[in-house]
């Protein structure tokens, strides 16, 4: 089973084209999510659509409150695979449990920075925003910003991450959330 997390606010559904594209890539056929999503209020909602290869199984709405993330624990894991937005996140949850005193983790796979447990990550480095071309999951916000040419894709080393002037977390709910102050812990 798979899921999509979709931002809804003021009865508007955000970036639905990118979610539809990811669903089609995941299961090999088109499902029009618009047919299933009807926000229940005007507040900021996290819409969770659970589906399998054949159909939409459930659509639920939850009030959304953004987590305050300031410090990160680097987690080195070469065997992680999360190429589709699987409902089963045991592997990511296990890595997240290693965060110690930090707010969030940054997963490093084969010496390349990939993602956090909940988002893609971009760095402001050498006068441009760079996102890993080796993200574990191709996020919908990442896809949109690449298409709009706001970010560029390339490998991000741990050294580049540590020298970055700023970092940004990217996901459907927070968009492109720039952190000017952050701490990276080994």
Image (spheres, helix red, strand yellow):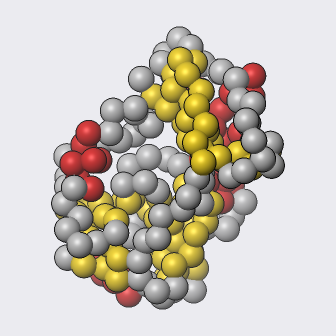
Quadrant where the image shows the C terminus: bottom left
How many discs mark residues in the rendered view? 0
Q: Residue at x 49, y 16 (%)?
A: 53
User: In this rendering, is residue 130 above or below 85?
Assistant: below
- When asked about the image quadrant of residue 91, the answer is top left
Is 70 or 124 nearer to us in this picture? 70
Horizontally, residue 20 falls left or right of residue 137, namely right
Horizontally, residue 26 falls left or right of residue 7, namely left
Is 12 or 114 nearer to us in this picture? 12
- When asked about the image quadrant of residue 18, the answer is top right
Place of residue 178 in the rendered image (x, y in percent of width and height, measured from the top left): 56, 75
Horizontally, residue 136 falls left or right of residue 59, namely left
Place of residue 157 in the rendered image (x, y in percent of width and height, measured from the top left): 32, 73
Is 33 or 83 nearer to us in this picture? 33
Q: Residue at x 58, y 42 (%)?
A: 62
Q: Residue at x 59, y 60 (%)?
A: 174
Horizontally, residue 186 falls left or right of residue 21, namely left
């Amino acid at each position: 089973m798979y899921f999509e997390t979709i931002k809804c606010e003021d009865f508007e559904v955000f970036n639905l084209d990118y979610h539809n594209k990811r669903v089609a890539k995941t299961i090999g056929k088109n499902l029009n999510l618009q047919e299933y999503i009807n926000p229940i209020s005007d507040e900021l909602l996290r819409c969770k659509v659970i589906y399998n290869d054949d159909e939409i199984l459930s659509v639920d709405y939850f009030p959304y409150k953004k987590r305050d993330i300031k410090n990160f624990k680097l987690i080195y894991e070469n065997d992680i695979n999360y190429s589709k937005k699987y409902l089963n996140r045991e592997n990511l949850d296990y890595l997240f449990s290693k965060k110690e005193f930090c707010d969030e983790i940054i997963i490093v796979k084969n010496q390349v920075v990939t993602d956090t447990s909940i988002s893609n990550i971009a760095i402001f480095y050498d006068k441009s925003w760079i996102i890993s071309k080796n993200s574990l999951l191709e996020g919908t916000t990442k896809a949109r910003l690449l298409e709009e040419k706001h970010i560029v894709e390339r490998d991000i080393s741990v050294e580049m991450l540590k020298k970055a002037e700023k970092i940004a977390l990217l996901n459907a709910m927070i968009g492109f959330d720039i952190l000017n102050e952050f701490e990276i812990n080994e």
